[in-house]
Image (cartoon, rainbow, N blue to C red):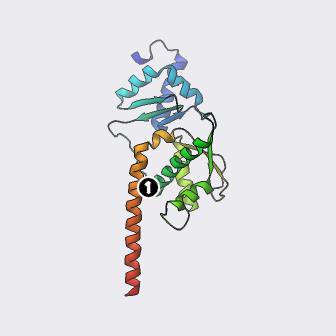
Amino acid sequence: MEYLEGMLQKEKDNFGRVCNRLLGTCFLCKGNQNTKADYYFVLKYRKEFKEYLGVLGYRLEINEEYGVIQLTSPRGINRMNLKLYDSIILLILRILYDEKKRELSAIEEVIVNLGDIQDKFISLKIRDKIIDKTTMRNALSLFRRYQIVELLDRDMGDEESRVLIYGSILMAVRAEDIKAAYEKLETYRKGKNESDEETDEDEAD
């Protein structure tokens, strides 16, 4: 392949492996020790990666300020439709990231705990109850697979269990996405309130 001319065989093998990783996870984070080497490998061969992945219909976005590489699809290929609570938890992670980052230095990692997530969920007034353990575990496991978070503790029932949020959250949920998400949540709350009112009227009858 002309994209790989001049590379050693080891680098060619690495190129294919990293392409597959990007196709599977969408993100590479400098802050993730497991993928840090891959992040720098893409920076070294960014032209080759952009050209090759472009042929496949993808766009490679590199943000060195965030330390994040993202694979996107202008054609909407392989887009994932999140469940409602997955979307809500993702939004909460972005909000918490912004809040915590303002308190930290530029180089410090953003770590929150499950209690922080639950508190923010309650403050959004979506439900009076906290997010159940299974829903929380499934959502965070999904985001871990896509290199948005890392789970530092295993117990999803302990509010002190810690979650590291990578800078990829800034590209996964952009500023305009936050506004749209809030509008959807407001619609959800209104629909829920109307449903509750109808239930109360039925019970009164």
Q: Is residue 22 above or below residue 15?
A: below
Amino acid type at mark 1: Lys
Label 1: few (<14), some (14–19) or many (≥20) C-alpha neighbours in 10 Å: few
Residue closest to the far left: 75
Q: Residue furthest front?
A: 102
In the displayed structure image, the side of residue 85 where residue 103 appears, left or right: right
Residue 78: % across, % down: 38, 41
Q: Residue furthest top?
A: 6
Q: x, y percentage for residue 106?
A: 60, 34
Q: Nearer the viewer, residue 6 or 128?
A: 128
Asked whether 58 or 94 is in front, the reply is 94
Residue drawn where x is 44% and y is 57% of the image: 84
In this view, 55 is above or below 152:
above
Q: Quadrant of the C terminus?
A: bottom left
Q: Taking the image as drawn, is residue 153 in sight?
A: yes
Identify which residue is drawn at 48% across, 53% down.
86
For label 1, the SS is loop
Q: Which residue is mark 1?
A: 83
Query: Residue at the location (37% across, 71% down)?
Result: 194
Which quadrant holds the N terminus? top left
Report x, y in % for residue 196.
Answer: 41, 74
Q: Position of residue 49 (x, y in %)?
A: 44, 24
Q: Is residue 1 visible?
A: no
x 41%, y 84%: residue = 203
